[in-house]
Image (tube, rainbow, N blue to C red):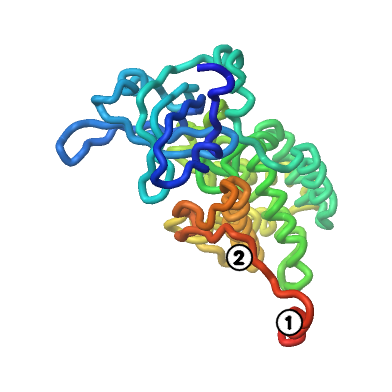
Amino acid sequence: MSKSENQTVAQLRGIAVGEKQPFGGIFLLRKAAVKKAKNGNDFLSLEFGDRTGSFQANCWGDSPAYPALSQAKEGDIVRIGGVSDHYRDAFSPNLRAAQVLDEKEAEELGALDGLLKVSPEDPEALWDEFSRLTDGMANEGLRLTVRAVMEECQGAFRTAPAAVSMHQAYRFGLLEHTVHVARVGKALLPLYPEVEPSLAMAGCLLHDIGKVIEYAGGLVQTRTRQGRLLGHVVLGYKLVRSAALRVQKKFPEKINADTIERLEHIVLSHQGELEWGAAVLACTPEALFVSLADNFDAKMSMAQEALRDAPQGTELSEFMKGLGVQLLLTRPVLADGAEAKEQQENLL
């Protein structure tokens, strides 16, 4: 397959439903599982992706692509070809050929740079903003605690994804999500004077820090052994507690046991619900504040990504598990002139 035949996920998802055409592309194999059909035969359930998105595909035992794909591992680079098809209006092709490539081969074919999805925001600017938000906290003990955590894991934090699949599941995604949550917090704190600002901001900046251990890097993000056994909530609690105790030992007058416990509680409860992974439910104003800010950005980021990735003219997204809906992707058409003025007056 020549360079000109390398199609992206965005291009493939732009193929009209019902239209069948040959395609070819080089993608990351993000997920692979062997499943059993109703007739008892095994088939492969696969997810392929690149910088522009991802799609699902099944590969049956009688497909010419089956031998190569049955040996491929999650994280492999795979060149595939076939005929476009759709399932429930989502691109789900008929695979006819497959070949596992190494990074050098993918680079020679001009595909390597397009495989790894990254944050649409400048990671250096995000890190500068994170640092300013840290410096802006009035409480020195909490400020020192955030810095102590970053001294231990800044490198991983600045490049890690925020998730494997739900939201900001790309390089620099964790930094992007954290800064977004802190932005939400900074904007809303003046409305809720009962919430202690430094404690809430420290929680915004550290709530997901356990993800630096939960996920393993590479072309495809996977969960580590610790991530599977403990999860980012507990891992984050351990990182934050260790850093806070180091600060307390060195500067006992700057952070007390009550503050440490409240910060730990924010990390342990930020997932919001026990069935979502929270160790406990939020029971301080600051913990509730951070949990809601976290959920707000996670869901709005899903919507942002769907809007960014949608092919031109697409009306509805595919079903989004994290939101529980198909998102309307067409932009609103607002009234103008006298009608708009009347609507504005009605709102006021």
Residue 124, can we see it? yes
Question: Which circle marks residue 288 in the picture?
Answer: 2
Task: Estimate how packed mark 1 is, as few (under 14), some (14 to 19) or many (20 or more) residues with alpha carbons within 10 Å.
Answer: few
Question: Which circle marks residue 283 in the picture?
Answer: none
Which secondary structure lies at badge 1?
A: helix
The amino acid type of the residue labelled 2 equals Leu
As drawn, the residue found furthest toward the left would be 39
Quadrant of residue 188 within the rendered picture: bottom right
The residue nearer to you, when weighing 86 against 255, is 86
The residue nearer to you, when weighing 103 against 125, is 103
Left or right of 263 in this view: 146 = right
**Residue for point 54% across, 23% down:** 5
The residue nearer to you, when weighing 306 against 219, is 306
The residue nearer to you, when weighing 220 against 97, is 97
- Residue 20 versus residue 336 in the image, above or below: above
Left or right of 77 in this view: 95 = left
The amino acid type of the residue labelled 1 equals Glu
Find residue 28 and report its horizontal and vertical position in percent.
50, 28
**Residue for point 51% across, 24% down:** 26
Task: Estimate how packed mark 2 is, as few (under 14), some (14 to 19) or many (20 or more) residues with alpha carbons within 10 Å.
Answer: some
**Residue for point 42% across, 57% down:** 275
Q: Which residue is mark 1?
A: 339
Which secondary structure lies at badge 2?
A: helix
Find residue 79 and report its horizontal and vertical position in percent.
47, 22
Find residue 70 and report its horizontal and vertical position in percent.
33, 23
- Residue 175 versus residue 340 in the image, above or below: above
Quadrant of residue 82 within the rendered picture: top left
